[in-house]
Structure formats: C-alpha cells, structure tokens
Image (cartoon, rainbow, N blue to C red):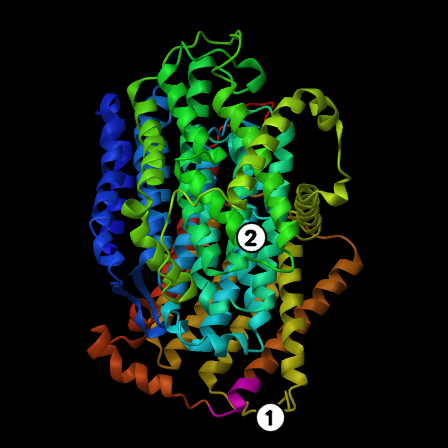
Amino acid sequence: MFNLLLVGFIASAAAPFLYKPFRNYFGWISASFPLYLFISFLSRYREIAGGRVIRESVSWFPSLGINLTFLLDGLSLTFVLIITLIGTVVFLYAGAYMKGHAHTDRFYLYIGLFMTSMVGLVLCDNMIALFVFWELTSVTSYLLIGFNHHLETSRKAALQALLVTGGGGLALLAGLLLLAGISQSFEISSLYHLHAVVIQSPVYAGIVILVLIGAFSKSAQFPFHFWLPNAMEAPTPVSAYLHSATMVKAGIYLIARLNHILGGTALWQDTLVVIGTLTMLTGAILAFTQMDLKKLLAYSTLSVLGTLTLLLGIGSRLAIKAFFIYLVAHSLYKGTLFLVAGTLDHETGTRDVALLGGLKRKLPLTMLTAALASFSMMGIIPLVGFIGKETVYASILELQTWGPFLLAAAVVANGLIVMVTMLVGFKPFWGSAQATPKPPHEAPLKMWLGPALLAILGLLMGLCPNALIGGLLDRSALSILSEEMGLVIKLWHGFNFVLLLSLVTLLLGFLFYALRGKYLPAAQKVQLSPIAKPSAWYEAGLNGMLSLAGLQTRILQNGYLRYYIITILVTTMALALYPLFGAGTPAVHWADFSITLYEAAILLVMAISTFMVITSDSRLKAIVAIGVVGFMMGINFIIHSAPDLALTTFAIETLTVILFVLVLYKLPKFIRLSGTANRVRDALIATAVGVFMTLMVLHVTAGDLASELKTYFAANSLPLGKGRNVVNVILVDFRAIDTLGEITVLAVAAIGVFALLKLRLDRKEK
C-alpha cells in the first residue's frame, strides 16, 4: 500500500512532463494509473470479503509513535474502490473535456495528488498520518476549485473551501490528540477495545465535538454546507470527482471509522441524527430554486450526505446496511450525472437548465447514460439506487421516537431529489429544442464511455447486488459496528409499506417538478435574514479577521524600524518580568565583579565605542564603532577559550561592516529624532533593557549550571556525529531540524529580496 501511494505521488509529479509529448492520448495514459490501483485493490476483494484484515506499517517518527500505518479492511476497501473507479472515469473524461486548456498539464498534477492523498486518507490507521492526508486533500482541492484562477469567483470559492475545511481540520487534529491521550497510541486500531474507557473519559464530550466539527466541515454538513455549492466554480471533472464521490465523503468515512470507538452515546448518535436531518432537508429545499445543472446536483449531493450522516446516527444494523448501499449507489449515479452536466456544458455552451431541451437526437448516447443514472437516483427498480432508497426507509421505520418525523423528512427530501433528477437527467433531452450558444453534437468517446460504464454498473449492482457488493457489506459493517451482521442484499422485498413509500416519493417528485415553474419566481425572491445564513456568518468572520489584520498592521507594521524594535523589546520584558520577580526566588544576586586587566581594557573600549554610536553625527563613524564593539566581543571569546565563536564573530562583524559601507551611499540622510520626549523614551527603554538583561544573566549564573546535556554531547559528538567540534555537531546533527528551519527562513528571505531586485516599475507605478 505504501509503495502504491509513493508511485501515485511520483506519477502525479511526472504528469506535467508527460502531457506535452503525449497530449493527444493523455486521457487514456492518465486513466491507466487509477485503473491499475483499482485492479490492484480489487484483487484483494476475496481476501477482505473472507474476513482478512491487511495491515502494513512503515517507520516515520518511531520515537513519537508516529508511523505510516495502513489498514485494508471492508470499509477502507469500499472507499478505495470508489475513489479509484471514479478516478479512472474522471481522468479519461478530462482528456477530452480539458483538451485545449492552457494548464491541462497542471490539472493532472493537482488531481493526481488529490486522488493519491484521498487513497492514503482512507487507508491510514495512524491518526497523525490520517491528518496529514486529510490536509493534503484540502490543499489539493483548493488548487482544483481555484483552477480557473483568472476568475474572481473561482478564487473566492477556493479560499472559502480551504478556510472551512482547513479550520475543521485543526479541530479534528485537537480531537485526535485528545483521543490518542487515552490510549497512549496514535493507532486507531489500538482504541477498538477501549470503547468503555473512551466514553467514560472526562474529555469525551470535547473529543466528540472536535472530531465532528472536522468531519462536518469536510462533508459539508449543516452549518458548513455553503462551501460545496460555491465550489462548483471548479471544472466539471473536479466537481464530479471531489464533490460527488470522494472528498465530501471523507468526513462520512471518518465518522464511520470512529463510530465503534466514539459511538453508542446520546451525544454522538443524536448529534449525527439532528445534523444529518438538517443537512438532508436544507440541501433538498435549496435545490428547488437552482437553474444551473451543477448547482442542482451540488444541493442534491448535500441532501444525500445528510442522509448518510443520519443513517450513521441511527446506527442500527439495517441503517448501516442502508448506509453502505446508499454510499455506493450515490457515488455511481452522481458521478455519472455530474459528468453528463459537464458534457452538456461542453457541447452546448450552457449549464442553464432553462436553455436546454430537445437534445435527444443530437446527444443520443449521453441521453441514454443520463436516463440510466437518473433512474438509479430516483430509486427506480432494478437499479442499485432503488435498493438504497428502500433500505433507507426501512431503517427509519425501525425508530420509535423520531421515526414518523424522520420518515416524513426523508420522503420530502427524496421527492425534491426526484425533481432535481427530472431537471438534470431528462429535461435537457426531451421536449422542444432550445437555442443554445453552441450547436450541440454528441461528445467524443472519452467523455461518454466512462459515465456510461458507471451507469451500467449501477444497473448490474441492482440486478446482482450480492455478487458485486454483498461480499463487502459484512466486512464494512464490522468496521463500523464491530459485530457480524450476516445481512443479505435483496432487490425485491414484495409489495409492502416501504414500496408504497417509494411510489409516494416518485409521485411527490413529479408534483414538485410540475409545480416548480409556477412557484419558482416567488421562491427565488425569498431572502433569509443574514443572521439565519451560515454563509453570512462566514463572510462576517472573514471580514472581521481582515479588519483585525488591517488594524494590527496599521499599529504594528507602521513602516518604522524603531517602533518595531521598541515593540519587541517592551513585549519581551513584559512577558519575562513576572517569572523573574514573581516566581518566589530572588531575581537579583550578588556576583563576583572582579575582572582581569585584559577584560577591563575590553570593557573600556566597548563602552567608548557604544558612546560613539549613540552620539555620532556620521553614519560611517557609527558603523566603525559598532564593528569595534563586535571585535571586542570576539576577543573576549578568545580570552575565555572559545576560538570557534571568536572566528565566527570576526567573520560576521567584518561582513556586516563591509555590507554597511557598500550600501552606505544608498541610505537616506542621517535623521535625528527631534523632541525631548523621544530622547527620554529611548533612553528609558534602553536603560530598562540593559538592566533587564543584566538581571537575567545574574539570575541564570547564580544557580547550578550543571547539565546532563553537556556530558551527553561531549560523549556522543564523535561516535554519533562523527565530529570533534561539539558545537558544529550540535548544529548539524543534534539540532538538524532547527538548523534546516533557519536555512529555510534565509532562503525564503533571499527569494523575496531577489524578487524585489528584479521588480521593474514604470513611473506611474512608482
């Protein structure tokens, strides 16, 4: 599994270089990788269905208990097969859809990285590794949503998705760290037998809230739902892949994976039921007024995501069965319809459902594909969507308290989804022909082959459910509920109340569709108060953050170096004064002030040079005086047997003086601050800093300076670091990450300086 992920990242990085020489065939070439992954994991189907769990671990940070641990069981295999199968279709589809785009090579880089990250996410058993892949999907989705970055709407939608899902990711990290604190391990599987310990923990409520915030933000659950429809600014292959089958289901996967660890309590189950129901209804109702094909599908996706969350909240054996079937069915038919919407846009030049009609003769293959996927989405026998919808209703009927209300909500929501299906899957192809911006014609092979295969697969899964997906049902349920269920998937359960509910849903959907034209203008005029719109809260929060940033910039980043220095020094003293004077130990200690003649001479020269710096009217004289102070410090190091520090000091001081002299002629004229108040302020601050640093040194040196680190470094520098200079070994080996960070900061600063030097502004810009 690790090797497959590694190959995925390498192949994604190589995609831009391979695209240019093979651009005419790159759709087929790119689809070969997700297809290879799909076949590789599908070959493990029998093993996993037979009850085997495959575990693989690669050492990452073993001292911290952080490893790249991957787990392949029924639940993860189901998600991996969905990700790679839809990925194969989308990669092939993009070969035609993105043809001629200026940045198609970049597109394949982004979507390849996303697919690999998504596969890693659902395979991870280590919490920290899972979080890393979780954030990788957020970053790559940001790049994909904002792919058309020349459009302000795309940039805004990408930023919104990143902030919402990224903020949720931070909450998730906090929850996972609290969870790891209970088991003293970052492995999720280590918590499988600690359910009672976890729910009795005093931090259980905090864990649930933080984890669910992360999951809800990723899967666009209410009140985080608003980012998903806005993300439709992305190219259609992105919408079909990220926002129907993969990324939006990452939060659903996380809830399912942690269900048998955190579930079984009123807090967990009731929260999922309430939020799932709200999302299910909100998405379906908001779809009523939409005219854009992708927006219609996006809001219906919200409704289905809410239904999946609701089923996990119900948590019964039948509900988990419904969750599994509905998850698979939705991935197939929604991925197909998103791609059909992209085909209609690509071939007609519009996604406005009011401008589409009578296309069945022009796009016959697309019409058949859309019809087959639409029948599944509506819940028509014998497609897999029919099984999913009936099982959802059956699981809700088991509930005693909230059953009638939830059943009514599900019927209304599914009725609105039937309306959406009529608008997306049938209206563009039937009725009178409409004038479109482009003359319509059938899409190329790459654009209809994949969606057609997904639609046909939905039919086959409905006809032969146990042969195709039944083997993973018990294994997935075992991962969610930690118990064997022995459930069988059946297409036909006879004439019963559930079948009647399915018929009522269809009739209600046809009624919504028939009445939509009459009530649409009035519905579009309805405006909610900003206080009731989560998107308005997001905008208010973002604007508030930007206003705060502007305020602190005006106060702190005012362009005057002296104020920066004053702020840093005063803040440092303010933070350190309490530990120094209020810790219960004396802050001032008597010290031995006896010094040698050499030290006295050095001190005198440094004092004279410092006085020259602060009183000089010549910048050159001040620079020379500063250099003298530095060189005296280097001589002091020599006296105290630190020649390496002395050489470093001499080198830095020499370089600093030279650089100052070289740029001297470009500096502004020497400015003296006018006003007695400024001079008094600076004198007081300088004196306070000097006294403060003196007290700090006395405080530190008054205690016992014995440290085991000195002995450790002296003993291990040569055998472990292969160096006799202890300081150098500490910098290069023992503090390698710290040193690398410093080098990185300098490199970034150098890039910024280089960019400024290369900048050429005309007179107006200057």
Query: Is residue 62 positioned above or below 99 on the image?
Result: below
Give the residue number, with chain letter if any, for mark 1: 590
Q: Which residue is labeled 2 in the image?
A: 396
Instruction: Estimate the spatial distance between the alpha carbons at disc 2 and disc 1, rounded to whole Å.
Output: 79 Å
Residue 624, given in percent of the width and then of the height, sits at 50, 58
Would you say residue 700 sits in the magenta stretch? yes
Quarter of the picture containing the C terminus is top right
* Res 553 visible: yes
Magenta range is 698-704
Residue 330 visible in the displayed image: no
Q: Which amino acid does label 2 sit on?
A: Ile
Where, by quadrant of the figure, is residue 562 drawn? Answer: bottom right
The vertical placement of 152 against 348, above or below, is below
* Front one among 597 and 528: 528
Residue type for callout 1: Trp
For disc 2, the neighbor class at 10 Å (few under 14, some 14 to 19, many from 20) is many
- The residue at 62%/63% (across/down) is 568
